[in-house]
Image (spheres, rainbow, N blue to C red):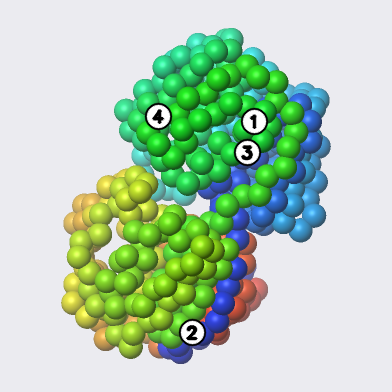
Amino acid sequence: MSILRIEGGRPLRGSVHVQGAKNSVLPILAGTFLARGVCVVHNCPRLTDVEYTLSILKHLGCRVGREEDTVTVDASDPVAADVPDNLMRQMRSSVVFLGPILGRMGRAELSYPGGCELGPRPIDLHLSALRAMGADIREEGGRLVCGGRLTGGDVTLSLPSVGATENAMLAAVAAEGITTITNAAREPELVDLQAFLNTLGADVRGAGSSVITIRGGRPLHGGEHTVIADRIVACTYLSAVAAAGGEGEITGVDWRHLSTVTAVLAEAGCGVTSSPDTIAITAPPVLKGVRPIRTAPYPGFPTDAQAVVMAALCKAQGATVFSENMFDSRYRHVDELSRMGADIRVEGRVAVVYGVPRLSGARVCSTDLRGGAALAVAGVGAEGTTLLGELQHVDRGYADLAADLRALGADIRREEREWSGT
């Protein structure tokens, strides 16, 4: 089994370029199924979630190729309208194929998706959005069987769900007529998806706002697109510098996409300066606790950054309160941080971090994607050796976490060894 060995307790100094955004590339790859031609997607990171997505496209009959960080998908001749159960179970975002398959094939069949266990994440909003466009969706033996001719309609989301907004956008470009999505999610990844779809010949407007309008039914051709940088990966590396001390430079990322996180790090005492595609951070000897952090849909503080920022603040003077408003089970990393000496009290959706003078290296396990990254952040700031296992979670969202942290000056390497948990 792969583990990360981290020798912590030394300030960081270095520069790292941020990979393409996981939360952009997955819906974009699903969207290639709508094109009657070849799509070329640049800045496509090597993640296990991406590989599962490419496997789904191959099953559907697409010709798929990869050269370094560029992926080509030719969906000219699809042969299937279903997603195998074993692939659906691997990741939550697999449900984003529902809209494209139904829109392209007129039918779709898939099971409920898997992914990190962060508490109930029902796909009701996805289904209601597609039903508003005329889809007939029923459950048969634990699988979703979908049919019907999609037409434009008014889709009103009760919550600004990113996944449901993506599914609705992807289905709507194939539907005849105009679709309006109200209370849409506003994340930068949706703006990226809009740019990709318009490159293929779609007419999508308003992404980044709460109302998106799609004029559907236009023939879609192939196209070329470069995925935006992963803002959560950038938050991870900024948090690592804050945790360990020193200074670092994060390149290739739009600072506006993570301004709520950089504001927290600045409040904690870090010097943060931004230019169009670079964020520089200088950490003080000791961080300070900050005002309460409440996760919220974009442009609020991202739930995906909660764990890595919490890890950085474990050694801050004073206390910091976290309120998790997006998922029920997003504090699974807390017990592992406690193994390293962190003092964190959890009550329901609230976690209070009482800063301690130091963390100590320990044997810990990734609990989920962002929790695993948080433990790596804590490891670079801890004294001694940290062994981090269960890396399959981390590999879903980080192309090479060890190499990137080494570029920032961390002493970290990936090893193969026996592992029986903590």
**Of label 4 and label 2, which has the lower sequence position?**
2
Characterize the local packing of mark 4: few (<14), some (14-19) or many (20 or more) Cα atoms within 10 angstroms: some
Q: Which residue is mark 1?
A: 83
Q: Which residue is mark 3?
A: 196
Characterize the local packing of mark 2: few (<14), some (14-19) or many (20 or more) Cα atoms within 10 angstroms: many
Q: Are marks 1 and 4 in contact (CB under 8 Å)?
A: no
Classify residue 229 by image quadrant.
Answer: bottom right
Q: Nearer the viewer, mark 4 or mark 2?
A: 4
**Of label 2 and label 3, which has the lower sequence position?**
2
Quadrant containing the C terminus is: bottom left
Of 56 and 271, which appears nearest the observer? 271
Q: Could you tell me residue 137's position as x and y percent? A: 50, 16
Along the horizontal axis of the image, is 316 left or right of 175? left
**Residue lying at 45% horizontally and 68% vertically, measured from the top left:** 274
Q: Could you tell me residue 99's position as x and y percent? A: 57, 25
Q: Amino acid at mark 2?
A: Leu
**Residue lying at 29% horizontally and 85% vertically, measured from the top left:** 286
Disc assigned to residue 211: 4
Q: Give the tally of numbered discs.
A: 4
